[in-house]
């Protein structure tokens, strides 16, 4: 595990993100995937993959509760690059059981309920999306939240037993915006309305100036617990 992580660090050191992705696509043919939720960061990485025709499978988690604007940028991205974006949906039986028992908005009632909902709508589909792969590309940046400062740009994911690479980990939000503008990349219009981080519609709100990047996600919960479980942070 540590050898794989170190090898990825070694071969990507000093490379621009698109160059690093091209190297990794060669190293892990047919075993490298990128997860997009169509935010700024993910759109930048999708452009790197699609514009360079890199053999990296791009997928998204279709939770069933996304914003209309998210579906719009999903469509415009496929129109722009003429490349597939693979959708993974929640398991129907698990979802129906939860909603039948607790209703459609149980996630507001407790952290446990919210994590159950994230588990069904995100974690279980993610495991299916990652199965059989050796490297997972993400759009994580260090300054997105306090928790993510503790991460590194290459990590081992013990939950899913594969390596993770965050190609724009050291970019600032201004870097991302400049890249989006430079290449005229489609992006989610909610970003222009105070939504720096966009997830499911019932669990995301706009943030005020000066608020934390992820303050709009699960805003009714403790600020220090703003992760859904997709990216577990190691405790040091």
Image (tube, rainbow, N blue to C red):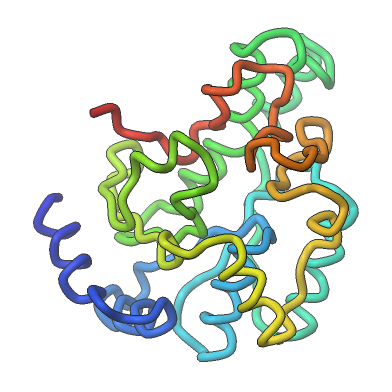
Q: Residue 81: image x %, image y %?
A: 69, 86
Residue 150 vs residue 125: left or right?
A: left
> Residue at image x 51%, y 91%?
52
* Residue lying at the far left of the rendered structure: 3
- Who is closer to the viewer here, 161 or 146? 146
Q: Quadrant of residue 45?
A: bottom right
> Residue at image x 48%, y 54%?
141
> Residue at image x 38%, y 68%?
32
Residue 51 vs residue 189: left or right?
A: left
Q: Residue 222: image x %, image y %?
A: 60, 16
Q: Give the answer, above or below, for where 48 lies relative to 204.
A: below
> Residue at image x 66%, y 63%?
40
**Quadrant of the frame with the C terminus:** top left
Q: Give the answer, above or below, for where 214 lies relative to 2.
A: above
* Residue lying at the far front of the rendered structure: 210
* Residue lying at the far bottom of the rendered structure: 52
- Who is closer to the viewer here, 131 or 6? 6
- Who is closer to the viewer here, 19 or 212? 212
Q: Residue 142: image x %, image y %?
A: 44, 50
Residue 76 vs residue 113: left or right?
A: right
Q: Give the answer, above or below, for where 198 lies relative to 51.
A: above
């Amino acid at each position: 595990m540590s050898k794989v992580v170190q090898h990825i660090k070694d071969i990507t050191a000093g490379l621009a993100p698109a160059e690093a992705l091209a190297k990794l696509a060669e190293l892990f043919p047919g075993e490298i995937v990128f997860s997009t939720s169509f935010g700024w960061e993910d759109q930048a990485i999708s452009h790197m993959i699609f514009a360079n025709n890199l053999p990296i499978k791009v997928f998204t988690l279709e939770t069933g509760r996304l914003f209309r604007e998210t579906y719009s940028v999903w469509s415009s991205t496929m129109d722009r690059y003429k490349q597939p974006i693979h959708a993974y949906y929640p398991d129907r039986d698990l979802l129906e059981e939860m909603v039948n028992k607790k209703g459609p908005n149980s996630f507001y009632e407790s952290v446990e309920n919210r994590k159950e909902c994230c588990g069904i709508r995100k974690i279980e589909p993610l495991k299916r999306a990652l199965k059989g792969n050796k490297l997972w590309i993400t759009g994580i940046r260090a300054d997105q939240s306090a928790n993510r400062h503790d991460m590194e740009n290459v990590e081992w994911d013990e939950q899913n037993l594969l390596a993770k690479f965050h190609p724009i980990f050291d970019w600032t939000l201004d870097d991302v915006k400049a890249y989006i503008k430079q290449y005229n990349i489609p992006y989610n219009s909610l970003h222009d309305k105070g939504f720096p981080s966009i997830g499911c519609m019932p669990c995301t709100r706009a943030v005020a100036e000066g608020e934390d990047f992820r303050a709009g996600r699960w805003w009714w919960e403790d600020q220090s617990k703003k992760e859904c479980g997709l990216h577990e942070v190691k405790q040091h």
